[in-house]
Image (cartoon, rainbow, N blue to C red):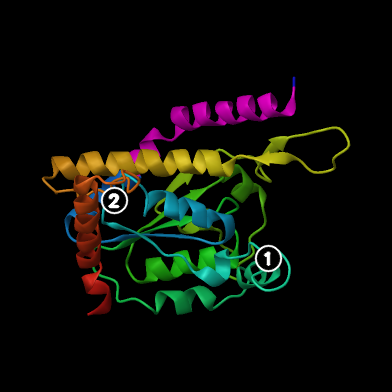
């Protein structure tokens, strides 16, 4: 069996386990999100490093709608050069620096119905733990997307001794193993084939769809982001402008 099939089959099993074990947690998370968005609140998504991808998988993404905000801190998630400027060392350092997350939160005036989804496969980095603690101190709920196994098997890195799993109101387990990767090959000391992108994107999109359904049942009008690749389609362009305006209005309370 070649490595590509091994990766596919192992990741497929994780997705099957996700379906078997996470529906109740997705239900609870969707209730938090829908009830708050329906009352004018916002659900922020925060993730450092590669977890940023899950934030942008929720919004802005085809089929998304106002109510979710990707809180992307560039200093923590732009490291494409690996070495030199925009390299990997500074973001990895900042993830461990306590006090940084609080400065991020100070940039907003959160409303009474806002909430957070915090994404971190390990669930132990100081920046995500501190951010979750700061969110809870401000009276907002925290939904965590993480690998329960990795988080439970790892020592805490924040000075409080807490992990993200200890702070969250709801935990969505992406099912990834410790270290994320699932493929072992002869001649390699470390595994390859990371899984959290696949399972994390599945959780994000299941949650988004569930929230959309609940909002419709509450009578909330959804303004969806259409595909902007329909070149020459006037309806798609008009819908895109409607989405921009609805999103702008949804942010108004943050800067009052």
The residue identified by callout 1 is 88
| Residue range (magenta) | 2-28
**For the point 45% across and 44% down, which residue is it?**
172
Q: Taken as a whole, is the magenta stretch helix, strand or loop?
A: helix
Dot 1: element = loop
Split into 4 quadrants, where in the image is the C terminus?
bottom left
Between 78 and 166, the one lying in front of the other is 78
The residue pinned by badge 2 equals 32
Can residue 174 be seen here? no
Question: Which quadrant of the rendered structure holds the N terminus?
Answer: top right
Residue 157 in magenta stretch: no
Which badge, 1 or 2, comes first in the chain's sequence? 2
Q: Is residue 158 left or right of residue 106?
A: right
Could you tell me residue 90's position as x and y percent? 66, 72
On screen, residue 55 above or below 147: below
Q: Nearer the viewer, mark 1 or mark 2?
A: 1
Displayed quadrant of residue 180 = top right
Give coordinates of residue 181: x percent, y percent.
Answer: 68, 41
The answer to whether residue 116 of the structure is visible from this angle is yes
Left or right of 160 on screen, residue 34: left
Lateral position of residue 228 relative to residue 85, left or right: left
Q: How many marks?
A: 2
């Amino acid at each position: 069996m070649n490595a590509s099939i091994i990766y596919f089959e192992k990741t497929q099993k994780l997705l099957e386990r996700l379906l078997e074990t996470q529906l109740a947690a997705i239900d609870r998370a969707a209730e938090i999100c829908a009830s708050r968005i329906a009352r004018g609140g916002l659900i922020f998504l925060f993730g450092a490093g590669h977890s940023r991808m899950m934030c942008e998988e929720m919004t802005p993404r085809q089929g998304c709608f106002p109510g979710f905000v990707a809180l992307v801190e560039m200093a923590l998630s732009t490291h494409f050069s690996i070495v030199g400027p925009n390299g990997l060392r500074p973001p990895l350092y900042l993830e461990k620096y306590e006090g940084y997350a609080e400065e991020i939160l100070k940039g907003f005036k959160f409303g009474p119905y806002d909430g957070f989804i915090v994404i971190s496969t390990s669930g132990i980095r100081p920046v995500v733990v501190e951010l979750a603690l700061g969110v809870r101190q401000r009276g907002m709920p925290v939904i965590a997307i993480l690998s329960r196994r990795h988080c439970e098997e790892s020592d805490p890195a924040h000075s409080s001794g807490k992990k993200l799993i200890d702070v969250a109101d709801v935990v969505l387990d992406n099912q990834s193993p410790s270290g994320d990767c699932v493929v072992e090959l002869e001649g390699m000391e470390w595994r390859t084939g990371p899984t959290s992108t696949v399972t994390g994107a599945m959780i994000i999109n299941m949650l988004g769809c569930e929230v959309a359904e609940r909002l419709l049942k509450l009578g909330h009008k959804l303004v969806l982001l259409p595909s902007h690749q329909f070149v020459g389609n006037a309806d798609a362009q008009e819908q895109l402008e409607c989405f921009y305006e609805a999103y702008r209005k949804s942010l108004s309370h943050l800067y009052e």
